[in-house]
Image: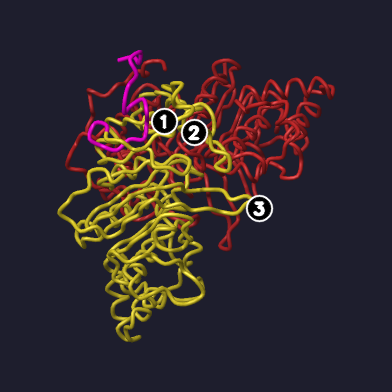
Amino acid sequence: MTGATPAAEPTLLELTGVAVEYGRRGARVRAVDGVDLTVAAGEVVGLVGESGCGKSSLGRAAVGLEPLAAGSARFLGEPVTTIGRGARPGRLRRLQMVFQDPYSSLNPRRTVGDLVADGVTLGGGSRAEGRTRAAALLERVGLPASAAGAYPHEFSGGQRQRIAIARTLAADPLCIVADEPISALDASAQATVANLLSGLVRDGGIGLLLVSHDLSVVRQVADRVAVMYLGRVVEVGTTEQVWSRPQHPYTQALVAAIPRPDGGGVLPADLPGDVPDPADPPSGCRFHPRCPIVEDRCRTTDPRPETVAGREVACLVRAAPSARADA
Amino acid sequence: MEPLLRVEDLRVELPTRRGLRPAVDGLSFDVGEGEIVGIAGESGSGKTMTAMTLLGLLPHGARTSGSARFDGRDLLTLGRRQLRDLRGRQIAMVSQDPSTALHPILPVGTQVTEHMRHHLGLSKSAARAEAVDLLATVRIPDPERALGAYPGQFSGGMRQRIAIAVALAARPRLLLADEPTTALDVTVQAGILRLLDRLRRERGLAVLVITHDLGVMSAVADRVAVMYAGRLAESGPRAQVLAAPRHPYTRGLLDALPHPEAADDPARVALRPIPGSPPSLGDVPAGCPFHPRCAFAVPACSTDRPEPLPVAAGHLLACPPDPLPRDDAAPVAEGAPA
């Protein structure tokens, strides 16, 4: 399920049939269940879905922070091995992650310069190189070089997230997985960091997997969007396709639920029900208990992704409308 | 007749290491029965402190002036006992984080019924019946069983709905909702916004919604007040403030948002953040607090404090240069009823 990948750019990250499981009271819960996704150079892929849909687990598995229960994750054709007690293999150094909370991801007792320089020295650079590059990287993310001497607490949330991004850039990444990088920030700081990330991709040819529950932000920066529901990808396409003409009923519900700040006083559309327990997913299509266009076959048949209106959609009804379906 | 809540020239000073500093400075607004009024602004703008003031929950050493009349009584001068009787009974609050609003080791039923029994004097069985009704109203599936369950057994969205049920238990007349949907997914948010809208229509509930999310504001609020550094920047009918803002700060907040409706535009426009960050408490610039970040600032903005003045019916603007172009095409009347 790759959607409309631009063929010209090389694939950096390739996820095939990825499954992630967690143990819960002796039982295994599949948080991610068979996801295919690629990220190419110079491309932002947005991964959206509600809490508990498995998008963060998928993002973490993509960089080797969670073991795979099935499938494979490859970076530049090489398998992404799960991080253990030892050092992460050098070949994965150019696959990096940015975390949601810049308050917990930066060591409060070390200076910003030291934190950023780590990315350089861990890649084999000298400490002097680290210091020089740290100053340059801080400027690249829009902070003064003098920030290197300060401590994380002296900065606002948005500035801290920029420091975290500078640290990631120190490893000279080809591909970045960012898990909700702007959710913890104020609206204006969100715009700054979103612009910074998309600028890095456009100017630096980096591939970015942007995990977010905020469709508006993803819409603004992503080239392609993958929508997850209960461990599965239900729709992948270009941002414009997914946003303007969503096909999967779940994507349609997500888009319709976003309130528009236009002063129009329109209540967002409701999607009744809650996300089911991933330990006990519904039979057939996992969305069928909440689906407005559900048919009998949806309760028994698990839909596979098929091409609908130029993008991949996992929906029996959209792939092959039944005779009695409305227009 | 005076509206249910009338806040006039509210000033709240908080103790800091350098003495008292204003967190809210000259704020006025009304909330009538069945009305939803929104207060918008970035973190540190004083919007949460406004709610805390109305509940009498300010930190020790805080000082207030102005007035906040609820049903004719000034909340700022009420005694502790009288305030305690109002809180929960007449004025209730829902906060951003449902996991801290609910007691983790008390069953949901106990938390919903204790207000009914304490404030309304209902019997155990009457309270239980009403709790079942209330949980059904906020759309908790199987409310009978939910009464015996614990908060940890519910998802975040369900917990927030339970927190709203607890807040509504004593049939309050005013609900203070501080970022009620910020931690939730959009589909759950949509459900809660529709619930608030239904409660104000069916029960005449007055709601003060505090949020940085202008989309949420646009969906439910009848009138909107935009705060910056403790002061009112602009307030008025939702359609005027959000579709044709007059204050550069309101304009900036809107420009910093992604615009879902621009999806057909192939050349995606970069988000336009407001340069700089809001001032911290006690560091508020002289004159207009927004002037260091304002693209339209004139010399007077750094010296003269702007007062909110009417620019249209019900529309107050604290920006004497009033530099934004009038958009005559923008709706000035209420939007179509939802």
* Dot 2: chain letter: B
Specify the amino acid type for callout 3. Gly
Does B142 appear in magenta? no
Nearer to us: label 1 or label 3: 3
Left/right placement of residue B132 relative to residue A90 reads: right
Q: In this view, does A164 lie above or below B118?
A: below
Q: Residue A257 carries which label?
A: 1
* Magenta-colored span: A308-327
Whole-percent x and y of residue B58?
Answer: 64, 46
Q: Is residue A217 above or below residue B196?
A: below
Quarter-wise, where is residue A90 in the image? bottom left
Secondary structure beneath dot 3 equals loop
User: Cα distance, mark 1 to mark 2?
Assistant: 8 Å
Specify the amino acid type for callout 2. Gln
Could you confirm whether marks 1 and 2 are on the same chain? no
Q: Residues within 10 Å of mark 1 (few under 14, many from 20)?
A: many
Could you confirm whether marks 2 and 3 are on the same chain? no
Residues at marks 1 and 2 touching, judged by CB atoms closer than 8 Å: yes
Residue A237 in view here: yes
Residues at marks 2 and 3 touching, judged by CB atoms closer than 8 Å: no
Q: Which chain is red?
A: B
Q: Is residue B116 above or below residue A76?
A: above
* Dot 1: chain letter: A
Q: Residues within 10 Å of mark 2 (few under 14, many from 20)?
A: many
Q: Is residue A251 above or below residue B137?
A: below
Residue B285 in view here: no
Q: Name the residue under label 2.
A: B189
Secondary structure beneath dot 2 equals helix
- For chain A, the rendered hue is yellow
